[in-house]
Amino acid sequence: MAHSATEDHAPTLPPGVFAAALTPLHPDLAIDHEAYAEHCRWLLASGCDGLAPMGTTGEANSFSVAERIEALERLIDAGIPAAKLLVGTGCSAIPDTVALTRHAVALGAAGVLALPPFYYKNVSDDGVYAAYDQVIQRVGDAGLKLYLYNIPQMSGVALGHALIGRLTKKYPHTVVGMKDSSGDWNHMKTACEMFPGFRVYAGTEKYLLAIVRAGGVGCISATTNVTCALAGQLYAKRSSNEADALQQVLTKVRDTIEQYPVIAALKRLTAARTGRDRWRVPRPPHLPLDDERFEHLKADLERLGFVPP
């Protein structure tokens, strides 16, 4: 296992397009590590600048701590560069978050993406601050680069600007960015304005061009598991005259996929790309997308002129 990075030598997460990587499963619902590495290699070769494994799209909270540790180790052993990884580590229990975070830092991951504790709702900012503070103190590693994960529609816990300000003031070299999946453009834009140098990634490619223009650094998205080439093209041409037209197409594709259960839809599209039927399977409580709805999805995408890879 790699030694922990020092603050001076900690890798910097690249800007640009990230995929919130899907997690393939065997029929017994165990992680298919071979298919996982294969998919991640394909994403990096097809327009993604980095990957966010074990996030919401990766069904992280349907896996145990031991499963998540093994998944990351085997991904890196398979040649996926740790310096391109933003690893999901947030759990309801602080010791679990600490264990996953320490492990990711030790393996050289460029950052960790940390949900707030999400089981209890209507908690105060003081409580959320205390939870993040405990994690950072217990990890106790100058190489830790922690990205806040704001996804209140799933977690039930919103990360407001006052909380971000408190954390970045106390830990300016540790709390370095955020994935904002709230869908609230004003929240993302204001974070970019209030905290110069704070690395804001939009949680959808719908805001890729807007977030970069506002001073953010890119997007970390579920649907870039299939839109990676188009999103990568947009990011590469973000300063060109083509950028706005490309963004319009990308937004329409994202909006279309969002009309279906997203994880199940993306897994069906990935099964079609790879020829591996195993990709169809999510872990409960998610359910597979049935054939009829999948045919509707493909037809909807084809009407946009988008042919999934």
Image (cartoon, rainbow, N blue to C red):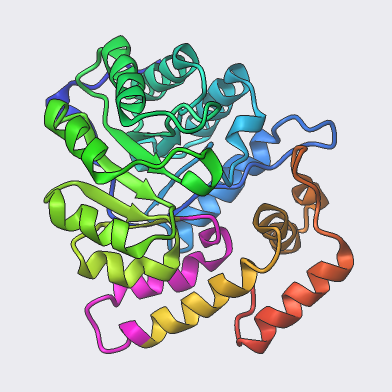
* Residue name at image x 11 percent, y 51 percent: 196
Q: Is residue 235 magenta?
A: yes
Q: Is residue 89 magenta?
A: no
Instruction: Say if 231 sits above or below 83 in the image.
Output: below
Seen from the viewer's position, the closer of residues 236 and 139 is 139
Instruction: Say if 92 sits above or below 304 in the image.
Output: above
Write the start and end of the magenta stretch as one range.
221-244
Instruction: Say if 238 sits above or below 208 in the image.
Output: below
Picture coordinates of residue 280 (x, y %)?
Answer: 78, 51
Figure quadrant of residue 167: top left
Report the side of 31 relative to 208 (left or right). right
- Residue 309 seen anywhere in this rendered image of the structure: no
Instruction: Say if 252 sits above or below 183 in the image.
Output: below
Picture coordinates of residue 214 (x, y %)?
Answer: 20, 66
* Residue name at image x 57 percent, y 19 percent: 65
Report the side of 158 relative to 265 (left or right). left
* Residue name at image x 24 percent, y 16 percent: 141
Picture coordinates of residue 178 (x, y %)?
Answer: 31, 44
Seen from the viewer's position, the closer of residues 80 and 153 is 153
- Residue 224 seen anywhere in this rendered image of the structure: yes
Seen from the viewer's position, the closer of residues 183 and 49 is 183
Report the side of 183 relative to 305 (left or right). left
